[in-house]
Amino acid sequence: MTGKIWLVGAGPGDTGLLTLRGREVLGRSDVVVYDRLVGEGILSLMPKSAERVDAGKSSGSHTMTQRETEKLMISRALEGKRVVRLKGGDPFIFGRGGEEAEAIIRAGVPFEVVPGVSSAVAVPAYAGIPATHRDYCSGLNIYTAHDKANLVPDFNATTSIFLMGVSHSRELQERLMLTMPPDTPCAIIQNGTTSSQRVIRSELSGLYDAVKENAITPPAVIVVGQTAGLNLDWREAMPLNGKRIIITRPEGRAENLSLMLRDLGAEVILMPTIRTSTLHGSLDGVDLSGHDWAGFTSVTGVNALFELLSESGRDIRELGRARIAAIGPATREALRSHGLNVDYMPSVYDGHHLAEGLAHFGGKVLMFRAEGGTPEIDEAFRNYGIEPLSVCIYRTDYVKLVHVPKFADIIIFTSSSTVRGFSESVKSMREVLAVCIGRQTGDEALRAGFTNIRIAEQATLDSVVRACT
Protein backbone atom coordinates (compact mmCIF):
# COMPACT_ATOMS: atom_id res chain seq x y z
CA MET A 1 0.00 0.00 0.00
CA THR A 2 1.40 3.38 -1.04
CA GLY A 3 1.27 6.23 1.44
CA LYS A 4 1.28 9.91 0.60
CA ILE A 5 3.63 12.89 0.78
CA TRP A 6 2.64 16.39 1.79
CA LEU A 7 4.95 19.28 0.87
CA VAL A 8 4.06 21.67 3.68
CA GLY A 9 5.08 25.29 3.99
CA ALA A 10 5.80 25.99 7.67
CA GLY A 11 5.94 29.75 7.31
CA PRO A 12 8.78 32.05 8.44
CA GLY A 13 9.08 30.78 12.02
CA ASP A 14 6.17 32.03 14.14
CA THR A 15 4.01 29.04 15.09
CA GLY A 16 0.88 31.09 14.54
CA LEU A 17 1.71 31.44 10.85
CA LEU A 18 1.49 27.70 10.16
CA THR A 19 -1.70 27.24 8.13
CA LEU A 20 -4.65 25.24 9.44
CA ARG A 21 -4.18 22.70 6.67
CA GLY A 22 -0.50 22.43 7.52
CA ARG A 23 -1.31 21.70 11.14
CA GLU A 24 -3.95 19.13 10.16
CA VAL A 25 -1.60 17.02 8.06
CA LEU A 26 1.34 17.46 10.46
CA GLY A 27 -0.78 16.13 13.32
CA ARG A 28 -1.50 12.90 11.41
CA SER A 29 2.00 12.27 10.06
CA ASP A 30 4.04 9.08 10.41
CA VAL A 31 7.28 10.66 9.17
CA VAL A 32 8.34 14.33 9.26
CA VAL A 33 11.30 15.47 7.17
CA TYR A 34 12.06 19.04 8.23
CA ASP A 35 14.37 21.88 7.26
CA ARG A 36 16.64 24.09 9.34
CA LEU A 37 14.43 27.16 9.05
CA VAL A 38 11.31 25.53 10.50
CA GLY A 39 10.43 27.25 13.80
CA GLU A 40 10.96 25.44 17.11
CA GLY A 41 7.32 25.92 18.05
CA ILE A 42 6.20 24.17 14.89
CA LEU A 43 8.61 21.31 15.45
CA SER A 44 6.99 20.80 18.86
CA LEU A 45 3.67 20.06 17.09
CA MET A 46 5.03 16.90 15.46
CA PRO A 47 3.38 13.72 16.79
CA LYS A 48 5.53 12.01 19.39
CA SER A 49 5.12 8.74 17.51
CA ALA A 50 6.36 10.17 14.20
CA GLU A 51 9.79 9.44 12.78
CA ARG A 52 11.67 12.76 12.69
CA VAL A 53 14.31 13.38 10.05
CA ASP A 54 16.49 16.51 10.08
CA ALA A 55 17.22 17.43 6.46
CA GLY A 56 18.48 20.90 7.29
CA LYS A 57 20.89 22.76 5.08
CA SER A 58 23.07 25.77 5.74
CA SER A 59 25.88 27.36 3.80
CA GLY A 60 28.58 24.73 3.39
CA SER A 61 26.83 22.21 5.65
CA HIS A 62 24.16 19.71 4.55
CA THR A 63 22.70 17.10 6.88
CA MET A 64 21.40 15.31 3.78
CA THR A 65 21.82 16.02 0.09
CA GLN A 66 18.74 17.00 -1.88
CA ARG A 67 18.66 13.66 -3.69
CA GLU A 68 18.99 11.77 -0.39
CA THR A 69 16.08 13.75 1.04
CA GLU A 70 13.91 12.95 -1.97
CA LYS A 71 14.84 9.27 -1.85
CA LEU A 72 14.06 8.98 1.85
CA MET A 73 10.61 10.54 1.78
CA ILE A 74 9.63 8.56 -1.33
CA SER A 75 10.80 5.28 0.22
CA ARG A 76 8.81 5.96 3.40
CA ALA A 77 5.69 6.74 1.36
CA LEU A 78 6.13 3.51 -0.60
CA GLU A 79 6.08 1.72 2.77
CA GLY A 80 2.54 3.06 3.21
CA LYS A 81 3.41 5.93 5.54
CA ARG A 82 2.09 9.50 5.71
CA VAL A 83 5.13 11.68 5.07
CA VAL A 84 5.21 15.42 5.75
CA ARG A 85 8.04 17.34 4.11
CA LEU A 86 8.13 20.41 6.34
CA LYS A 87 9.77 23.39 4.67
CA GLY A 88 10.39 26.94 5.84
CA GLY A 89 8.21 29.59 4.22
CA ASP A 90 6.39 28.30 1.15
CA PRO A 91 7.56 25.10 -0.55
CA PHE A 92 7.32 26.57 -4.06
CA ILE A 93 9.13 29.84 -3.32
CA PHE A 94 12.88 29.13 -3.28
CA GLY A 95 12.18 25.98 -1.28
CA ARG A 96 13.16 23.46 -3.96
CA GLY A 97 9.63 22.13 -3.70
CA GLY A 98 9.38 22.02 -7.46
CA GLU A 99 12.33 19.63 -7.68
CA GLU A 100 10.84 17.44 -4.97
CA ALA A 101 7.45 17.41 -6.69
CA GLU A 102 9.10 16.27 -9.93
CA ALA A 103 10.86 13.44 -8.09
CA ILE A 104 7.61 12.36 -6.41
CA ILE A 105 5.76 12.34 -9.73
CA ARG A 106 8.48 10.21 -11.32
CA ALA A 107 8.13 7.74 -8.42
CA GLY A 108 4.35 7.56 -8.88
CA VAL A 109 3.57 8.53 -5.28
CA PRO A 110 0.44 10.57 -4.40
CA PHE A 111 1.27 13.99 -2.98
CA GLU A 112 -0.22 17.31 -1.99
CA VAL A 113 1.21 20.80 -1.74
CA VAL A 114 0.20 22.84 1.30
CA PRO A 115 1.26 26.44 0.62
CA GLY A 116 2.88 28.37 3.43
CA VAL A 117 3.24 32.02 4.42
CA SER A 118 6.35 33.25 2.63
CA SER A 119 9.01 35.17 4.54
CA ALA A 120 9.13 37.48 1.52
CA VAL A 121 5.94 39.16 2.69
CA ALA A 122 5.60 38.05 6.33
CA VAL A 123 8.99 39.22 7.63
CA PRO A 124 8.66 42.80 6.32
CA ALA A 125 5.10 42.88 7.69
CA TYR A 126 6.35 41.90 11.16
CA ALA A 127 8.81 44.79 10.87
CA GLY A 128 6.03 47.20 9.94
CA ILE A 129 7.08 47.41 6.30
CA PRO A 130 4.30 46.90 3.72
CA ALA A 131 5.45 45.06 0.60
CA THR A 132 3.05 47.14 -1.48
CA HIS A 133 1.37 50.50 -0.88
CA ARG A 134 -1.04 52.23 -3.20
CA ASP A 135 0.72 55.58 -2.82
CA TYR A 136 4.27 54.30 -3.41
CA CYS A 137 4.45 51.14 -5.53
CA SER A 138 2.34 48.92 -7.75
CA GLY A 139 4.37 45.73 -7.86
CA LEU A 140 6.62 43.31 -6.01
CA ASN A 141 9.61 41.35 -7.31
CA ILE A 142 10.98 38.52 -5.19
CA TYR A 143 14.52 37.26 -5.82
CA THR A 144 16.92 34.87 -4.19
CA ALA A 145 20.32 36.46 -3.64
CA HIS A 146 22.06 33.61 -5.43
CA ASP A 147 21.29 31.10 -8.13
CA LYS A 148 22.62 27.55 -8.49
CA ALA A 149 26.12 28.89 -9.06
CA ASN A 150 25.88 31.20 -6.01
CA LEU A 151 25.98 34.23 -8.29
CA VAL A 152 23.97 37.42 -8.28
CA PRO A 153 20.95 36.49 -10.39
CA ASP A 154 19.97 37.67 -13.83
CA PHE A 155 17.08 39.91 -12.91
CA ASN A 156 15.44 39.31 -16.29
CA ALA A 157 15.20 35.55 -15.66
CA THR A 158 12.30 35.75 -13.23
CA THR A 159 8.75 34.59 -12.81
CA SER A 160 6.25 37.43 -12.92
CA ILE A 161 2.89 37.08 -11.17
CA PHE A 162 0.08 39.51 -11.89
CA LEU A 163 -3.04 39.86 -9.77
CA MET A 164 -6.25 41.45 -11.06
CA GLY A 165 -4.87 41.47 -14.61
CA VAL A 166 -7.73 39.92 -16.61
CA SER A 167 -9.27 43.19 -17.79
CA HIS A 168 -5.84 44.52 -18.78
CA SER A 169 -4.48 41.35 -20.39
CA ARG A 170 -4.06 42.99 -23.82
CA GLU A 171 -1.99 45.88 -22.43
CA LEU A 172 -0.07 43.47 -20.19
CA GLN A 173 0.85 41.30 -23.17
CA GLU A 174 1.99 44.30 -25.21
CA ARG A 175 4.16 45.68 -22.41
CA LEU A 176 5.81 42.35 -21.60
CA MET A 177 6.60 41.59 -25.24
CA LEU A 178 8.76 44.71 -25.37
CA THR A 179 11.37 42.88 -23.27
CA MET A 180 10.39 39.18 -23.33
CA PRO A 181 10.30 36.57 -26.13
CA PRO A 182 6.84 35.92 -27.60
CA ASP A 183 7.08 32.20 -26.79
CA THR A 184 7.54 32.82 -23.03
CA PRO A 185 5.20 30.40 -21.18
CA CYS A 186 2.13 31.87 -19.47
CA ALA A 187 -0.54 30.41 -17.21
CA ILE A 188 -3.89 31.92 -16.28
CA ILE A 189 -5.36 30.48 -13.06
CA GLN A 190 -9.01 31.26 -12.40
CA ASN A 191 -10.69 30.64 -9.02
CA GLY A 192 -7.43 29.27 -7.65
CA THR A 193 -7.49 26.71 -4.78
CA THR A 194 -11.27 26.16 -5.10
CA SER A 195 -13.27 23.33 -6.63
CA SER A 196 -13.86 25.48 -9.72
CA GLN A 197 -10.17 26.20 -10.38
CA ARG A 198 -9.23 26.43 -14.07
CA VAL A 199 -5.71 26.59 -15.51
CA ILE A 200 -5.26 27.90 -19.06
CA ARG A 201 -1.80 27.80 -20.61
CA SER A 202 -0.52 29.86 -23.51
CA GLU A 203 2.54 31.64 -24.85
CA LEU A 204 2.99 35.33 -24.13
CA SER A 205 2.01 36.21 -27.70
CA GLY A 206 -1.36 34.50 -27.15
CA LEU A 207 -2.10 35.70 -23.62
CA TYR A 208 -4.94 38.07 -24.50
CA ASP A 209 -6.54 35.58 -26.90
CA ALA A 210 -6.40 32.87 -24.21
CA VAL A 211 -8.20 35.14 -21.74
CA LYS A 212 -10.85 36.04 -24.30
CA GLU A 213 -11.42 32.61 -25.84
CA ASN A 214 -11.73 30.90 -22.46
CA ALA A 215 -14.01 33.62 -21.04
CA ILE A 216 -11.73 34.14 -18.05
CA THR A 217 -13.28 36.33 -15.36
CA PRO A 218 -11.89 37.52 -12.02
CA PRO A 219 -10.55 36.34 -9.70
CA ALA A 220 -7.59 35.15 -11.70
CA VAL A 221 -3.81 35.16 -11.40
CA ILE A 222 -1.51 35.43 -14.42
CA VAL A 223 1.92 33.79 -14.26
CA VAL A 224 4.56 34.67 -16.85
CA GLY A 225 7.95 32.95 -17.08
CA GLN A 226 9.60 29.61 -17.69
CA THR A 227 8.05 28.00 -14.59
CA ALA A 228 4.60 28.63 -16.09
CA GLY A 229 5.47 25.89 -18.57
CA LEU A 230 5.83 23.28 -15.83
CA ASN A 231 2.92 21.02 -14.91
CA LEU A 232 3.35 19.53 -11.44
CA ASP A 233 -0.40 19.22 -10.88
CA TRP A 234 -0.93 17.17 -7.71
CA ARG A 235 -4.69 17.74 -7.56
CA GLU A 236 -5.54 16.18 -10.91
CA ALA A 237 -5.17 12.60 -9.66
CA MET A 238 -7.25 13.15 -6.51
CA PRO A 239 -10.63 11.38 -6.84
CA LEU A 240 -12.69 14.31 -5.50
CA ASN A 241 -10.77 17.08 -7.24
CA GLY A 242 -13.19 19.70 -8.55
CA LYS A 243 -16.00 18.66 -6.18
CA ARG A 244 -17.61 21.06 -3.72
CA ILE A 245 -19.16 19.13 -0.84
CA ILE A 246 -21.47 20.41 1.90
CA ILE A 247 -21.39 18.63 5.28
CA THR A 248 -24.51 19.12 7.41
CA ARG A 249 -23.30 17.45 10.62
CA PRO A 250 -23.50 19.40 13.90
CA GLU A 251 -20.68 21.73 14.87
CA GLY A 252 -17.81 19.77 16.40
CA ARG A 253 -18.83 16.52 14.70
CA ALA A 254 -17.72 17.22 11.13
CA GLU A 255 -13.95 17.60 11.46
CA ASN A 256 -12.93 13.99 10.76
CA LEU A 257 -15.23 13.70 7.76
CA SER A 258 -13.96 17.03 6.45
CA LEU A 259 -10.36 15.83 6.68
CA MET A 260 -11.14 12.60 4.85
CA LEU A 261 -12.81 14.46 1.99
CA ARG A 262 -10.12 17.14 1.72
CA ASP A 263 -7.45 14.44 1.57
CA LEU A 264 -9.20 13.27 -1.61
CA GLY A 265 -9.18 16.76 -3.13
CA ALA A 266 -12.67 18.06 -2.28
CA GLU A 267 -13.53 21.62 -1.38
CA VAL A 268 -15.50 21.21 1.85
CA ILE A 269 -18.10 23.61 3.23
CA LEU A 270 -19.30 23.04 6.80
CA MET A 271 -23.00 23.86 7.13
CA PRO A 272 -24.31 22.47 10.45
CA THR A 273 -28.07 22.14 10.08
CA ILE A 274 -28.76 20.84 13.59
CA ARG A 275 -27.59 21.57 17.11
CA THR A 276 -27.77 19.07 19.97
CA SER A 277 -28.08 19.90 23.66
CA THR A 278 -28.21 17.76 26.77
CA LEU A 279 -31.57 17.67 28.57
CA HIS A 280 -30.41 18.50 32.07
CA GLY A 281 -32.40 16.78 34.79
CA SER A 282 -33.74 14.14 32.41
CA LEU A 283 -32.38 11.33 34.63
CA ASP A 284 -34.04 12.67 37.77
CA GLY A 285 -36.16 9.91 39.30
CA VAL A 286 -35.24 7.42 36.57
CA ASP A 287 -34.23 3.96 37.82
CA LEU A 288 -31.50 2.68 35.50
CA SER A 289 -31.20 -0.71 37.15
CA GLY A 290 -32.96 -3.99 36.41
CA HIS A 291 -32.44 -4.09 32.64
CA ASP A 292 -30.80 -6.74 30.51
CA TRP A 293 -29.68 -4.32 27.80
CA ALA A 294 -28.73 -0.66 27.61
CA GLY A 295 -28.89 0.60 24.01
CA PHE A 296 -27.27 3.64 22.43
CA THR A 297 -28.15 5.06 19.01
CA SER A 298 -25.61 7.89 18.71
CA VAL A 299 -22.34 9.33 19.95
CA THR A 300 -24.30 12.32 21.24
CA GLY A 301 -26.41 10.03 23.43
CA VAL A 302 -23.31 8.42 24.94
CA ASN A 303 -21.73 11.76 25.80
CA ALA A 304 -25.00 13.17 27.15
CA LEU A 305 -25.48 10.21 29.49
CA PHE A 306 -22.07 10.58 31.08
CA GLU A 307 -22.55 14.34 31.39
CA LEU A 308 -25.88 13.79 33.19
CA LEU A 309 -24.48 11.10 35.48
CA SER A 310 -21.58 13.34 36.45
CA GLU A 311 -23.65 16.44 37.19
CA SER A 312 -26.04 14.45 39.42
CA GLY A 313 -23.31 12.59 41.35
CA ARG A 314 -24.24 9.24 39.85
CA ASP A 315 -22.22 6.83 37.73
CA ILE A 316 -22.53 4.03 35.20
CA ARG A 317 -22.62 1.31 37.88
CA GLU A 318 -26.36 1.97 38.15
CA LEU A 319 -26.78 -0.08 34.99
CA GLY A 320 -25.76 -3.12 37.02
CA ARG A 321 -25.30 -6.22 34.90
CA ALA A 322 -26.97 -4.78 31.80
CA ARG A 323 -25.20 -5.59 28.58
CA ILE A 324 -24.37 -2.76 26.18
CA ALA A 325 -25.66 -2.38 22.61
CA ALA A 326 -24.45 0.21 20.11
CA ILE A 327 -26.02 1.07 16.76
CA GLY A 328 -22.67 1.35 14.93
CA PRO A 329 -18.88 1.73 15.10
CA ALA A 330 -18.80 5.44 16.01
CA THR A 331 -21.15 4.88 18.95
CA ARG A 332 -19.12 1.82 19.97
CA GLU A 333 -15.92 3.88 20.01
CA ALA A 334 -17.59 6.60 22.09
CA LEU A 335 -18.59 3.97 24.65
CA ARG A 336 -15.09 2.52 24.65
CA SER A 337 -13.68 5.98 25.37
CA HIS A 338 -15.73 5.92 28.59
CA GLY A 339 -14.44 2.45 29.51
CA LEU A 340 -17.43 0.40 28.33
CA ASN A 341 -17.13 -2.59 26.05
CA VAL A 342 -19.99 -3.23 23.61
CA ASP A 343 -21.71 -6.62 23.76
CA TYR A 344 -23.79 -6.24 20.61
CA MET A 345 -23.61 -4.17 17.45
CA PRO A 346 -25.74 -5.09 14.41
CA SER A 347 -24.08 -5.96 11.11
CA VAL A 348 -26.23 -3.28 9.45
CA TYR A 349 -25.92 -0.05 11.40
CA ASP A 350 -29.50 1.14 11.75
CA GLY A 351 -32.34 1.10 14.25
CA HIS A 352 -34.24 -1.71 12.51
CA HIS A 353 -31.35 -4.15 12.80
CA LEU A 354 -30.52 -3.01 16.34
CA ALA A 355 -34.08 -3.84 17.40
CA GLU A 356 -33.96 -7.16 15.53
CA GLY A 357 -30.78 -8.18 17.34
CA LEU A 358 -32.08 -7.24 20.78
CA ALA A 359 -35.32 -9.10 20.07
CA HIS A 360 -33.27 -12.19 19.31
CA PHE A 361 -31.45 -11.96 22.67
CA GLY A 362 -34.59 -11.12 24.62
CA GLY A 363 -34.87 -9.37 27.99
CA LYS A 364 -35.68 -5.87 29.23
CA VAL A 365 -34.22 -3.03 27.16
CA LEU A 366 -33.27 0.50 28.26
CA MET A 367 -32.71 2.94 25.39
CA PHE A 368 -30.97 6.31 25.69
CA ARG A 369 -32.50 8.51 23.01
CA ALA A 370 -33.02 11.96 21.59
CA GLU A 371 -36.20 13.83 22.44
CA GLY A 372 -38.70 13.03 19.73
CA GLY A 373 -36.59 10.04 18.79
CA THR A 374 -36.58 8.37 15.41
CA PRO A 375 -40.01 6.92 14.52
CA GLU A 376 -38.40 4.15 12.48
CA ILE A 377 -36.61 2.79 15.58
CA ASP A 378 -39.82 2.80 17.64
CA GLU A 379 -41.66 1.01 14.85
CA ALA A 380 -38.88 -1.59 14.56
CA PHE A 381 -39.01 -2.38 18.28
CA ARG A 382 -42.81 -2.75 18.14
CA ASN A 383 -42.51 -5.10 15.17
CA TYR A 384 -40.37 -7.40 17.28
CA GLY A 385 -42.62 -7.15 20.33
CA ILE A 386 -40.22 -5.07 22.42
CA GLU A 387 -41.36 -2.19 24.62
CA PRO A 388 -38.09 -0.61 25.77
CA LEU A 389 -37.84 2.01 28.46
CA SER A 390 -36.80 5.04 26.39
CA VAL A 391 -35.05 7.82 28.28
CA CYS A 392 -34.70 11.05 26.28
CA ILE A 393 -31.44 12.66 27.39
CA TYR A 394 -30.75 15.17 24.62
CA ARG A 395 -32.62 17.22 22.07
CA THR A 396 -31.99 18.26 18.50
CA ASP A 397 -32.75 21.76 17.24
CA TYR A 398 -32.55 23.02 13.70
CA VAL A 399 -30.00 25.70 12.86
CA LYS A 400 -31.11 28.61 10.72
CA LEU A 401 -28.60 28.83 7.87
CA VAL A 402 -27.59 32.42 7.21
CA HIS A 403 -25.25 31.87 4.26
CA VAL A 404 -25.95 29.17 1.70
CA PRO A 405 -23.48 28.50 -1.14
CA LYS A 406 -24.70 29.20 -4.65
CA PHE A 407 -23.84 25.70 -5.77
CA ALA A 408 -22.53 22.34 -4.60
CA ASP A 409 -21.81 18.98 -6.18
CA ILE A 410 -22.67 16.84 -3.15
CA ILE A 411 -24.55 17.33 0.13
CA ILE A 412 -23.80 14.82 2.90
CA PHE A 413 -26.52 13.88 5.38
CA THR A 414 -25.59 11.71 8.36
CA SER A 415 -29.03 11.54 10.01
CA SER A 416 -32.66 12.18 9.21
CA SER A 417 -32.55 15.29 11.40
CA THR A 418 -29.76 16.83 9.29
CA VAL A 419 -32.04 16.44 6.24
CA ARG A 420 -34.94 18.09 8.06
CA GLY A 421 -32.68 20.87 9.34
CA PHE A 422 -31.39 21.55 5.84
CA SER A 423 -34.92 21.58 4.43
CA GLU A 424 -36.02 24.09 7.05
CA SER A 425 -33.55 26.67 5.73
CA VAL A 426 -32.90 25.77 2.09
CA LYS A 427 -35.74 25.33 -0.37
CA SER A 428 -33.50 24.84 -3.42
CA MET A 429 -30.60 22.48 -4.35
CA ARG A 430 -32.84 19.41 -4.49
CA GLU A 431 -31.14 18.27 -7.71
CA VAL A 432 -27.73 18.07 -5.99
CA LEU A 433 -26.44 14.57 -5.20
CA ALA A 434 -27.48 13.73 -1.61
CA VAL A 435 -25.14 11.18 -0.04
CA CYS A 436 -26.89 9.60 2.95
CA ILE A 437 -25.42 7.50 5.72
CA GLY A 438 -28.26 4.97 5.74
CA ARG A 439 -31.65 3.93 4.43
CA GLN A 440 -33.65 5.92 6.98
CA THR A 441 -31.70 9.08 6.13
CA GLY A 442 -32.17 8.36 2.44
CA ASP A 443 -35.93 7.98 2.91
CA GLU A 444 -36.00 11.37 4.65
CA ALA A 445 -34.07 12.94 1.76
CA LEU A 446 -36.60 11.47 -0.68
CA ARG A 447 -39.48 12.96 1.33
CA ALA A 448 -37.64 16.30 1.30
CA GLY A 449 -37.67 16.31 -2.49
CA PHE A 450 -34.11 15.26 -3.36
CA THR A 451 -34.07 13.57 -6.74
CA ASN A 452 -30.51 12.20 -6.79
CA ILE A 453 -29.85 10.11 -3.70
CA ARG A 454 -26.96 7.76 -2.98
CA ILE A 455 -26.92 5.65 0.19
CA ALA A 456 -23.63 4.53 1.74
CA GLU A 457 -23.15 0.77 1.86
CA GLN A 458 -22.57 0.98 5.61
CA ALA A 459 -23.39 3.63 8.18
CA THR A 460 -19.76 4.68 8.62
CA LEU A 461 -17.80 7.75 7.60
CA ASP A 462 -15.48 5.62 5.45
CA SER A 463 -18.48 4.32 3.54
CA VAL A 464 -19.94 7.81 3.17
CA VAL A 465 -16.67 9.01 1.67
CA ARG A 466 -16.60 6.08 -0.75
CA ALA A 467 -20.14 6.98 -1.82
CA CYS A 468 -18.89 10.45 -2.77
CA THR A 469 -16.28 9.18 -5.20
Image (cartoon, rainbow, N blue to C red):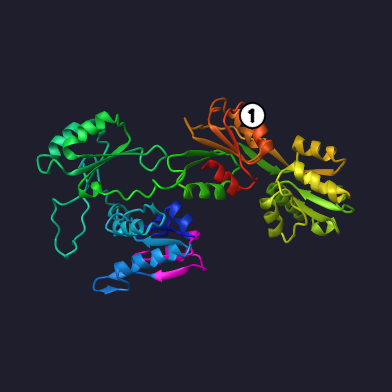
Q: What stretch is highlighted in magenta?
A: 27-53
Q: Residues within 10 Å of mark 1 (few under 14, many from 20)?
A: some
Q: What residue type is labelled 1?
A: Leu
Residue at screen point 51% across, 32% down: 403
Where is residue 371 shown, x and y percent of the image? 75, 38
**Quadrant of res 127:** bottom left
Of residues 312 and 331, the one drawn nearer to the viewer in this rendering = 331
Residue at screen point 31% across, 31% down: 217
Asked if residue 283 shows in the view, the reply is no
Residue that numbered label 1 is attached to: 446
Of residues 313 and 8, the one drawn nearer to the viewer in this rendering = 8
Asked if residue 7 shows in the view, the reply is yes
Magenta stretch holds residue 39: yes
Is residue 303 left or right of 146 when viewed as pictured? right
Residue at screen point 26% across, 29% down: 213
Residue at screen point 66% across, 51% down: 330
Where is residue 433 shown, x and y percent of the image? 54, 33
Where is residue 120 shown, x and y percent of the image? 27, 54
Q: In this view, does 203 lie above or below 50?
A: above
Of residues 122 and 260, the one drawn nearer to the viewer in this rendering = 260
Give the secondary structure at mark 1: helix
Is residue 79 left or right of 34 when viewed as pictured? right
Is residue 434 left or right of 353 when viewed as pictured? left
Q: Is residue 416 above or below residue 19?
A: above
Q: In this view, does 294 lie above or below 395?
A: below
Where is residue 95 shown, x and y percent of the image? 30, 59
Is residue 11 left or right of 319 when viewed as pictured? left
**Quadrant of res 189:** top left
